[in-house]
Image: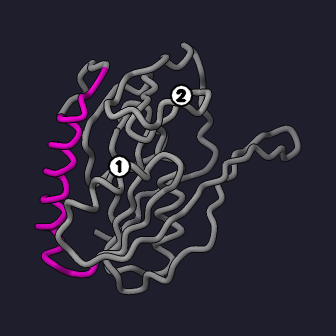
Amino acid sequence: MSAKRVSSYSAQRISARVAALGKQISRMYQGRRLDVVVTMDRGFVFAADLLRNVASPMVCHFVREQVRDVQQGNHARREVLFGSRPDLKGRDVLVLDAVMDTGITQEFLLRRLAESQPRSLRLAVLLDKMSGRHVDLEPDYFVFQTASNLEWVGYGLSDAAGKRRNERNLSAGSKKPAGRKQRNLASHSKKRKR
């Protein structure tokens, strides 16, 4: 599926797509227990709506990312930190996040979670900004694919001032400035259990 230039998604369209994704995930896990790891700040509204549409017993875990730039000699590098990780050995794990752009944060989290040797490890996102990818990672599930230069607000996503999370629709806000460059700071690989 290719990304279409859409500047908004209605609450009805979001609801229908999220419900369909919930059914798809339910078919995948066939009633097995599911450990869901939700990224806080952006993913909470998407996670709440999606999980009400998944027909499997589940346990929810919540993580909050911290990103900071660290200067090492003449080079800056970005560190992504998460709090303690749950014990997921032998479990089916689904990571939920709202937006996947460069994929660096999701790839780092998936690598950390894989260290506990889950039975399966998958990623679902609300918005897949596939052309902005800096790592070899694609979500297993997505609700919408969109252009990487669009910033979205509503449905749990805030504007630069931290507002508009409570809007029911998703709207394309301001675009990223042209020429803004994001750094690919580490080598990444796609070693996940399917």
Numbered mark located on residue 126 in the image: none
Give the residue at mark 2.
159
* Residue 31 is covered by the magenta coloring: yes
- What x and y, as percent, mark residue 101? 45, 38
Looking at the image, which residue is at 83% across and 44% down?
71
Left-right relation of 120 to 1:
right
Q: In the rendered image of this protein, does residue 171 appear above or below residue 194?
A: above
Asked if residue 57 lies left or right of residue 153, the reply is left
Tell me which amino acid carries mark 2.
Asp
Position of the N terminus, as image quadrant, is top left
Quarter of the image with the C terminus is bottom left
Give the Cα distance between marks 2 and 1.
Answer: 17 Å
Which element type, helix, strand or loop, lies under badge 2?
loop
Image coordinates of residue 2 in percent, x first then y, are 21, 29
Magenta stretch, main secondary structure, is helix
Q: What stretch is highlighted in magenta?
A: 8-33
Question: Between 89 and 24, which is closer to the camera in this rendering?
Answer: 24
Query: Could you tell me which residue is drawn at 54 percent across and 58 percent down?
Result: 108
The residue sitting at 60% across, 25% down in the picture is 181
Asked which quadrant contains residue 25, the reply is bottom left
Q: Where is residue 32 in the image (x, y as percent from the top left)?
A: 21, 81
- Residue that badge 1 annotates: 46
Of the numbered discs 2 and 1, the one sitting upstream in the chain is 1
